[in-house]
Image (cartoon, helix red, strand yellow):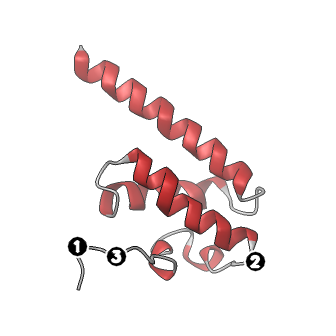
Amino acid sequence: MLVIVLYQKKRGIFTDIFYLYKNEMEDEITDDELLHLMKEQFELLCFGDLDYLEGTCLADFAQAVRAGYEGYQQSGGYGEYACFDVEKRWDFD
């Protein structure tokens, strides 16, 4: 039962983050592109940390989109954050 409650809570937070950044990017990005980006970053870069996803990955990406970046249109949102990742990472050289 606890697992279900935690899953529902995380899903609700993920949904809130989606709509926040959909608006932050002024609807320049499609739902699918944003979902692909969020899923990829959540699983591969943030390791399940929603605060990192929201406060770092999506914040940086939203800023780039608002500034006119459109590279995500060609990739469908896959592999895009690497273009903007300026954080010092412990898991990469």
Picture quadrant where residue 60 is located? bottom right
Q: Nearer the viewer, residue 62 or 80?
A: 62
Tell me the amino acid under the disc marked 3. Answer: Lys
Tell me the quarter of the picture where residue 67 sits: bottom right
Q: CA distance from mark 2 to mark 3?
A: 25 Å
**Disc sitting over residue 88 in the figure:** 3
Give how far apart the Cα atoms at labels 1 and 3 are.
Answer: 7 Å
Q: Residue at the bottom extreme?
A: 93
Position in image of residue 22 (x %, y %): 68, 51
- Looking at the rendered image, the quarter that the N terminus falls into is top left
Labelled pair 1, 3 in contact (Cβ < 8 Å): yes
The C terminus, quarter of image: bottom left
Q: Mark 3 packing: few (<14 Cα in 10 Å), some, or many (20+)?
A: few
Residue 15 in view here: yes
| Residue identifier under label 2 | 68
Local SS, label 1: loop
- Compared across the picture, whether 75 is left or right of 42 comes to right
For badge 2, the amino acid type reads Gly
Residue bearing mark 1: 90
What is the three-letter code of the residue carrying label 1? Trp
Q: Earlier in the sequence, mark 2 or mark 3?
A: 2
First in sequence: mark 1 vs mark 2? 2
Give percent across and percent down for residue 90: 23, 73
Q: Is residue 91 left or right of residue 80?
A: left
